[in-house]
Image (cartoon, rainbow, N blue to C red):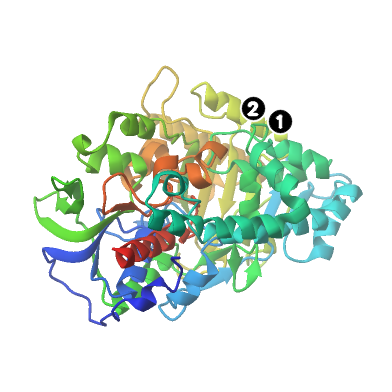
């Protein structure tokens, strides 16, 4: 059985300084320098395989990058929070030693209300963190019943998240091998049942609850627990973030688990800001990989996977025609890019290509990066007289979350090709905790917004004017909650779904490399025939978020793919 110890039986890794010359032969080539590709490279190199990573852009990290897109302001340009990175990867690759520093957020969620204050008091708001007593006080402003139910709900989700943890760090059940493989492969595949069995045993009587999370609308789950709209709407954003679904869509409940699935500094469910931006995660992984001897290159665009007459991957071709040969090729690109653009179409069956074309990459996300010269001043939590940040400024600030109906309307507008007129908006200000990101007194703001379609009404592509108009709408809504916000803006960048695709290679602009719907999870991710990270082309593997267990800066796909390769090479 493959395991995290699989690499121990191979020859020891050679430590070397960073190689500057690109060679024509390696043991393994990784296409794409996203966090999963870098993690896969680190594990392969650590096991003794001479590995090279080839990144198309000038900066490493895929969507987990830091870039100074406005002079003096350093942004987490796409991904913006860390929580889901698997603890064993953090430990195995010694990421803290290689420079990863995380600022923990507590409190972590702030939802201001758009209402008139009563008796001269400010409008109400909801502030949530790790302090159970304070959470109950905050929720009690809206419902005493919900205040009592919330810690029980959190504990319930955490129990389910712990139970499914074994599934994240192992490949899905290899159904094809069990049914059609050789005896040796069948025996090996049977061992993939073990994590599933572990999960089932740990779930125990909670198995029906887990099934409900997988299949039910998030609102069906939340309505069973709570009655207050602001709390339900705030929690519902976790269920739909990055997904073209509404909280009332079947299957939207699963992503609620992402809220508690992660772990930072041994604290389950914690989320934090990476020092220097999310590129700090990628840089620390790259540093670990290089320390073991891996070669990593930027501005090296791969245009084709080489496949020989026997149908085996033998290397890659760069945009400039340079060929690199290898025993295995790993693709950190989406399945659409891997099979639709990089792999010779003649090596794949029409049925397989048709299945690839059916993978859902719909995205409702527009990311807006904003530089400001002072902190936003919320009516529900007025700024201090000394201009220092309040506790709420470090949170995910949820705008337009008074009720689930607001989120539902935003979704329905997008479904018909129109950007939401009252969008779901999450505002994060990492510079409140990390002073390295902006000049003194200034701040960087990450605005993650939904719902915006890839194609506008009538099949029209986005224009710069469309993006400006949408950004104005978002800023106007923030202005309603924090008057004066617009006057603080000194620069911005608007990334609609097509921009996320063009810049970061996210097909359709989907931040998860494919929808996290039930039909695209576990042994169906990205397709049942390639859920084990292997592809129909021998020697070509997937290692990105389009594989199990899916999106987020988790790293499990990269680690799992690397260990699968090591096990395959060991078997011969």
Q: Position of residue 159 (x, y in %)?
A: 72, 59
Residue 112 visible in the snapshot: no
- Provide the secondary structure element on which disc 2 rests: helix
Q: Position of residue 456 (x, y in %)?
A: 43, 24
Query: Quarter-wise, where is residue 277 in the image?
Result: bottom left
Q: Which residue matches tag 1?
A: 405
The reply to whether discs 1 and 2 touch (Cβ–Cβ < 8 Å) is yes
- Provide the secondary structure element on which disc 1 rests: helix
Camera-side residue of 126 and 416: 416
Camera-side residue of 162 and 109: 162
Near mark 2 (Cα within 10 A), the count class, few <14, some 14-19 or many ≥20, is some
Tally of marks: 2
Instruction: Tell me the quadrant of the picture where the C terminus can be found.
Output: bottom left
* Residue visible at 50% across and 35% down in the picture: 364
* Residue visible at 59% across and 55% down in the picture: 196
572 sits to left or right of 544: left
Instruction: Tell me the quadrant of the picture where the N terminus can be found.
Output: bottom left
The residue lying furthest to the left in this view is 321
442 sits to left or right of 238: left
Query: Quarter-wise, where is residue 350 in the image?
Result: top left
Query: Distance from label 1 to label 2 (Cα)?
Result: 6 Å
Q: Position of residue 165 (x, y in %)?
A: 60, 60
Camera-side residue of 11 and 397: 11
Q: Which residue matches tag 2?
A: 409
**Residue 78 marker:** none
Near mark 1 (Cα within 10 A), the count class, few <14, some 14-19 or many ≥20, is some
Using the image, determine if residue 569 lies above or below residue 335: below
């Amino acid at each position: 059985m493959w395991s995290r110890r699989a690499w121990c039986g191979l020859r020891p890794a050679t430590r070397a300084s960073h190689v500057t010359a690109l060679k024509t032969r390696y043991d393994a080539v990784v296409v794409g320098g996203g966090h999963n590709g870098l993690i896969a490279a680190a594990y392969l190199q650590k096991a003794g395989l001479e590995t090279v990573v080839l990144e198309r852009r000038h900066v490493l990290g895929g969507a987990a990058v830091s870039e100074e897109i406005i002079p003096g302001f350093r942004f987490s340009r796409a991904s913006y929070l860390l929580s889901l990175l698997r603890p064993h990867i953090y430990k195995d690759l010694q990421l803290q030693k290689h420079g990863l520093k995380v600022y923990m957020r507590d409190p972590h969620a702030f939802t201001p209300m758009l209402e008139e204050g009563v008796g001269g008091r400010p409008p109400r708001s909801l502030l949530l963190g790790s302090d159970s007593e304070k959470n109950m006080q905050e929720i009690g402003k809206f419902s005493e019943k919900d205040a009592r139910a919330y810690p029980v709900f959190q504990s319930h989700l955490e129990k389910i998240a712990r139970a499914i943890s074994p599934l994240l760090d192992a490949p899905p059940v290899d159904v094809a091998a069990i049914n059609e493989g050789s005896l040796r492969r069948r025996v090996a595949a049977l061992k993939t049942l073990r994590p599933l069995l572990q999960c089932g045993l740990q779930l125990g009587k909670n198995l029906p609850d887990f099934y409900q999370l997988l299949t039910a609308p998030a609102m069906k789950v939340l309505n069973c627990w709570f009655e207050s709209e602001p709390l339900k709407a705030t929690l519902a954003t976790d269920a739909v973030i990055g997904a073209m679904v509404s909280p009332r869509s079947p299957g939207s409940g699963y992503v609620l688990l992402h809220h508690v699935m992660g772990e930072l500094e041994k604290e389950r469910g914690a989320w934090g800001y990476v020092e220097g931006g999310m590129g700090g995660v990628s840089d620390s992984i790259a540093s670990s990989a290089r320390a073991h001897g891996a070669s990593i290159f930027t501005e090296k665009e791969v245009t084709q996977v080489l496949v020989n007459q026997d149908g085996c991957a033998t290397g890659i071709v760069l945009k400039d025609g340079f060929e690199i040969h290898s025993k295995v090729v790993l693709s950190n690109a989406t399945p659409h890019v891997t099979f639709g653009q990089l792999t010779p179409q003649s090596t794949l069956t029409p049925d397989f290509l048709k299945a690839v074309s059916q993978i859902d990459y719909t995205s409702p996300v527009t990311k807006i990066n904003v530089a400001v010269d002072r902190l936003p001043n919320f009516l529900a939590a007025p700024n201090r007289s000394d201009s220092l940040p309040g506790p709420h400024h470090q949170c995910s600030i949820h705008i337009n979350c008074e009720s689930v109906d607001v989120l539902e309307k935003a979704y329905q507008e997008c479904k018909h090709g129109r950007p939401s007129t009252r969008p779901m908006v999450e505002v994060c200000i990492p510079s409140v905790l990390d002073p390295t990101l902006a000049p003194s007194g200034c701040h960087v703001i990450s605005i993650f917004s939904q719902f915006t379609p890839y194609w506008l009404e009538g099949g029209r592509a986005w224009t710069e004017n469309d993006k400006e108009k949408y950004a104005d709408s978002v800023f106007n809504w923030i202005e309603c909650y924090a008057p004066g916000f617009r006057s603080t803006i000194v620069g911005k960048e608007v990334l609609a779904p097509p921009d996320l695709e063009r810049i970061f290679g996210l097909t359709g602009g989907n931040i998860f490399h494919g929808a996290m719907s039930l039909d695209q999870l576990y042994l169906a991710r990205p397709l049942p025939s390639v859920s084990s990270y292997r592809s129909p082309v021998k020697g070509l593997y997937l290692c990105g978020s389009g594989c199990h267990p899916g999106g987020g800066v988790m790293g499990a796909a990269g680690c799992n793919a690397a260990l699968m390769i090591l096990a395959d090479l060991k078997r011969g």
